[in-house]
Amino acid sequence: MSPSSLVVAIDGPSGSGKSTVARRVAQALALRYLDTGAMYRALTWWLLEQGADLRDHRRVAALATQLPLTIGMDPHHPTVHVGAVDVGTVIRESRISSVVSMVATNLGVRSELVRRQREIVEEGGVVVEGRDITTVVAPDAPVRVLLTASENTRLARRAHDVHGDAHPEAVAATRDQVVRRDADDATVARFLHPADGVDVVDSSHLSVDETVAAVLDLVRRRAGVTPR
Ligand code: DC
């Protein structure tokens, strides 16, 4: 396997640290980085801009095919544009996080975004992260990883990201976002347990550096590729 055509597929629930880890792995291996969650978020942002009713499944699925999305996959500077608008920051706001599952559980939306993701996977040379990458988008990738962490760890990390600390109130406020959203998302993608042949990395007691090292070790063992 040529290192530059390698595909690394990473799935995990929210707060598992997969975005940070996937990005760092892509940097270490000089691969592109694709955050598929950003695609669902960008679509959600665009639908809200147009005042679309997110419950109207057929209309939402039809609009998904029209989404003018450009994803910049440089792992040192990933970008997300809808048309000419840079939505990289706004798609992380809680007004998006709180409704994105409604869009991501629309099966018509999934088939359109999975189609776009597979085009990128087919070109190779990419670390792709999401919820259905190891199972649906890139089931034949040589390296497939499920990144997990205990619920308490995930809640504390998200509370830290969103509120700047992990005080009990911040953790409670985060609980709905993390636990409810994962439960909703798990109805359409199986990311809480590994599929056959998928390696599990549990980051509950690992630092980011240690988690990146564990994934790079799997890349070395599964694909024979090491950082330059
Ligand atoms: O990883 P994230 O929080 O940015 O993901 C945003 C939403 O998109 C979340 O509700 C899960 C969903 N998602 C998905 O269903 N499939 C993917 N491959 C990636 C994200």
Image (cartoon, rainbow, N blue to C red):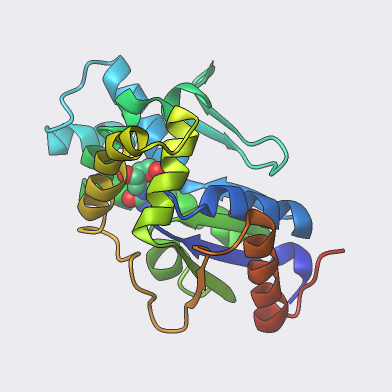
**Could you say where residue 155 lies in the image, as x and y percent from the top left?**
38, 47
**Could you say where residue 164 lies in the image, as x and y percent from the top left?**
50, 30
Please report the residue visible at 21 percent of the width from the left and 39 percent of the height from the top.
Answer: 102
The residue most toward the right is: 228
Please report the residue visible at 49 percent of the width from the left and 35 percent of the height from the top.
Answer: 161
**Could you say where residue 63 lies in the image, as x and y percent from the top left?**
28, 31
Q: Which of the 4 image quarters holds residue 189?
A: bottom left
- Residue 203 relative to residue 100: left or right: right
Please report the residue visible at 26 percent of the width from the left and 49 percent of the height from the top.
Answer: 179
Q: In terms of depth relative to the viewer, which is nearer, 224 or 151?
A: 151
Please report the residue visible at 33 percent of the width from the left and 66 percent of the height from the top.
Answer: 192
**53 over 71 or under it: above or below:** above
Q: In terms of depth relative to the viewer, which is nearer, 32 or 204?
A: 204
Q: Is residue 30 visible?
A: no
Q: In terms of depth relative to the viewer, which is nearer, 57 or 191?
A: 191
The residue most toward the front is: 168
- Residue 101 relative to residue 204: left or right: left
Q: How many marks?
A: 0
Q: Which of the 4 image quarters holds residue 208?
A: bottom right
Q: Is residue 153 visible?
A: yes
**164 over 136 or under it: above or below:** above
Q: Which of the 4 image quarters holds residue 187?
A: bottom left
Which quadrant holds the C terminus?
bottom right
**Could you say where residue 139 lies in the image, as x and y percent from the top left?**
45, 72
Which quadrant holds the N terminus?
bottom right
